[in-house]
Image: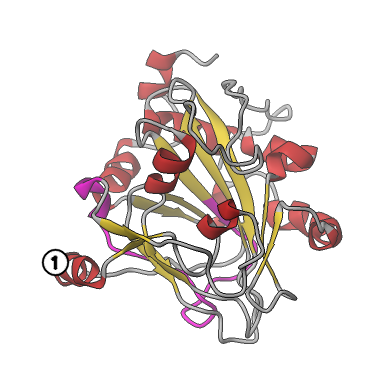
Amino acid sequence: MPDVARTLTAGPLGTELLDRYRRDGYLMLPPGYLNTDVPGVVDTLLPRLHADDGPRRVMERDNTTVRSVYGLHQTYPEIAEVTRAPELLGAVEQIVGHSAYVHQSKINFKAPFSGDQWEWHQDYIYWLQNDGIQRPDLVNVAIFLDEVTEFNGPLTFVPGSHRRGVLAGTESSGMPAGYEDAPSWVATLTAEEKFQVGHDTVGALVRERGMVSPKGPAGSVLFFSPNILHTSAPNSSPFRRAMVIFVYNSSDNGPQDVSKPRPPFLSEPTVRALTPMPYATGETPQ
């Protein structure tokens, strides 16, 4: 297990970047930050990802377009290695102030012309209510697999909204249209968010703090808080907008017992602190 005191003071992020993350709730870094060609790694796995017809694969409402595939770090050793990249894991440990593990991993595809939206929401409420994670000591790390533009459904954040904690939201009941026969946990993964933040709350925060949509080339890395208010529009462009997302959690903040636990590919049952992958001789973070 990494030394906790070390993770608070040492790592790839300087003080300015850490302060920016804590202030805004997100941090965007360029492709050169990663030493691993993550888009290339994932590209070799795409045929297997699309062909996976098990419950880890979630479809759009049309039942023909792949929306997401979950549990990547549990299934693909190549992805598990990426989660241990020192420039990722080290930054996460700096942010949460503790050793960390991957609670959830996924790829969100946003297919051309058919990738659906994600309604206004916060992520932590799902992990609190569905997985029993008691503190928001988590970090989302999104790695762009394609260029993200204003046209292909970028994530949109309300900067600083994470500092409001869990916002009042409406828990929808029943299953969204198009998913009536799916298991109940699928309701937490669809375009119609189970825990939606009301438009009045969104409007007030946007008028106070504005909105931002981080955009950039493939390989860009986006860290964002589990409590930042965010959404993404449908992809109406002819260009795919895919990204891999790792949800890191502090290793002393694992899931607790809940009445209806979600499948392991949505809530990692093994809480074991990750150790960083060693760099090749002469290789250092950029």
Image vertical order of residue 132 relative to residue 188, above or below = above
User: Which contiguous range is marked in magenta?
Assistant: 142-165
Residue drawn at x 64%, y 72% is 60
Residue drawn at x 41%, y 42% is 129
Quadrant location of the N terminus?
top right
Q: 261 or 90: which is nearer to us?
A: 261
Spot occupied by residue 262 in the image (x, y as percentages of width and height): 58, 41
Q: Is residue 124 left or right of residue 189?
A: left
Q: Is residue 177 left or right of residue 14?
A: right
Helix, strand or loop at disc 1? helix
Spot occupied by residue 227 in the image (x, y as percentages of width and height): 33, 48
Q: Is residue 178 left or right of residue 188?
A: right
Quadrant location of the C terminus?
top right
Q: Quadrant of residue 183?
A: bottom right
Spot occupied by residue 14 in the image (x, y as percentages of width and height): 36, 37
Image vertical order of residue 18 relative to residue 238, above or below = above
Q: 283 or 48: which is nearer to us?
A: 48
Evaluate whether residue 87 shows in this view.
no
Spot occupied by residue 215 in the image (x, y as percentages of width and height): 47, 69
Image vertical order of residue 67 relative to residue 96, above or below = below
Location of mark 1 (residue): 208
Residue drawn at x 28%, y 63% is 158
Q: In this view, does 167 lie to the left or right of 39?
A: left
- Amino acid type at image mark 1: Glu
Q: 152 or 7: which is nearer to us?
A: 152
